[in-house]
Image (cartoon, grey):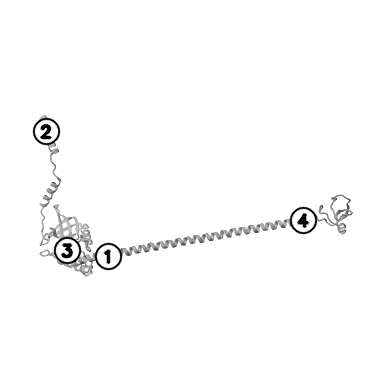
Amino acid sequence: MKKQIGIKLGVTFALLVSFLFSTPVPQYQVEAAKTKTEKKVSIKRTANKKVTVTVKKYIDGDTTRFKLKNGKNVTAKYLLIDTPNLKKDNPYAKEAHDRTKELLKNAKKIQIEYDKGKKLDSKKRELVYVWADGKLVQETLASEGLGVVHSTKGKNTKYLKKIKKAQQQAQEQKQNIWSIENYAQADKGYNQTVADEYKKARVEALAAKYAEEEQQRKEQAAKEAEEKRAAEQAEAAKKAEEKRIADEAEAAKKAEEQRLAQEAAAAQAQAEAAAQAQQAAQAQQAAEPAQGQTVYVTPTGSKYHTHKCGNGTYSPATLEEAQARGLTACAKCY
């Protein structure tokens, strides 16, 4: 028993040492082996048979990389259709790319189908028809003016009439690629000179549009600035007018208060003067002797008195008698 355990430990140790000190396989060798294995995977290019695939990469409007069920990736060129060159940014190239992507991305089932003719083009791309939920993608692109029919020599003509009919409709309605005169040419592709002129004109038009929009923005900004300045001036004028009215009202109020104060002071002074006059009159009246009153006079004096206010001999007399003699009231007494 102990011997068997020792043998097992020895084998385990040997395997561990071998693993630790063995030379690792370079990554590029692993990738090379993987690529070599993939190349061995066969592709059945059976005509008129639809094969279910999934999208690996969207390349442009008429080229897509698909993945087969066996794991093989194939780059497919759509048969009988030619969309604008995306690398050259030709007119409607991006629209065609986006439309193809939309059709395939929204499809629950994507299939490719070979025809009876050539299976590969000069770039080793698979020549196929592409179906999205049972609808031929080439037909959709042609009907929407996003691709031109491009016939091939040989037997790849199964859906040629179908796609040409769709293209005719787009031509008549001058959709997309057909809206540019002499740009799309059936079975010949696209006129690059026309494409370049269109792009140049488009750039110039965009530049002119941008310049016009920039001018409009400047004019709008100037208009808004002027309106703001006018509004500020109007507000300042309004506040100045309100201040003027308030100042005038305050001044009028103070003037009225001053006038009322002066009138009150004058009335008070008048009242005081009247009171003083009344008091003086009352005092004078009180000071004046009454008729029949007894007064005192001296034998040689010219005054009559209420009492003996000085030295000398005073004789009593009536007021009438004193006044009859021409005597006047003594200022000290009265």
Work out whether mark 2 precedes mark 3 in sequence or the reverse, and give the earlier one.
2
Residues at marks 3 and 1, CA–CA distance in whole angstroms: 31 Å
The residue type indicated by label 3 comes to Ile
Q: Earlier in the sequence, mark 3 or mark 1?
A: 3
Q: Which circle marks residue 81 in the picture?
A: 3
Marks 1/4: CA distance?
Answer: 113 Å
Residue type (three-letter) at the residue carrying disc 1 = Glu
Badge 3 marks a residue whose secondary structure is strand
For residue 10, which numbered disc appears in the image?
2
Q: CA distance from mark 2 to mark 3?
A: 69 Å
The answer to which of 162 and 269 lies nearer the viewer is 269
Image spot of residue 172 (x, y percent): 21, 70
- In the picture of the structure, the residue carrying the numbered disc 1 is 204
Q: Percent from the top left, x then y, of residue 203?
A: 26, 64
| Amino acid type of the residue that numbered disc 4 sits on in the rendered structure | Gln
Disc 3 + disc 1, Cβ < 8 Å:
no
Tell me which residue sits at (70%, 57%) in the image: 271
Q: Are marks 2 and 3 in contact (CB under 8 Å)?
A: no
Q: Residues within 10 Å of mark 1 (few under 14, many from 20)?
A: few
- What label sits on residue 282 in the rendered view? 4
Q: From where the camera sits, is residue 144 visible?
A: no
- Mark 1 and mark 4 residues within 8 Å of each other at the beta carbon: no
The correct choice, above or below, for 310 with respect to 200 in the image is above
Residue depicted at 69% across the width and 57% down the height: 269
Tell me whether the residue at label 4 lies in contact with that at label 2, contact meaning CB atoms closer than 8 angstroms.
Answer: no
Secondary structure of residue under mark 4:
helix
Q: Residues within 10 Å of mark 3 (few under 14, many from 20)?
A: many
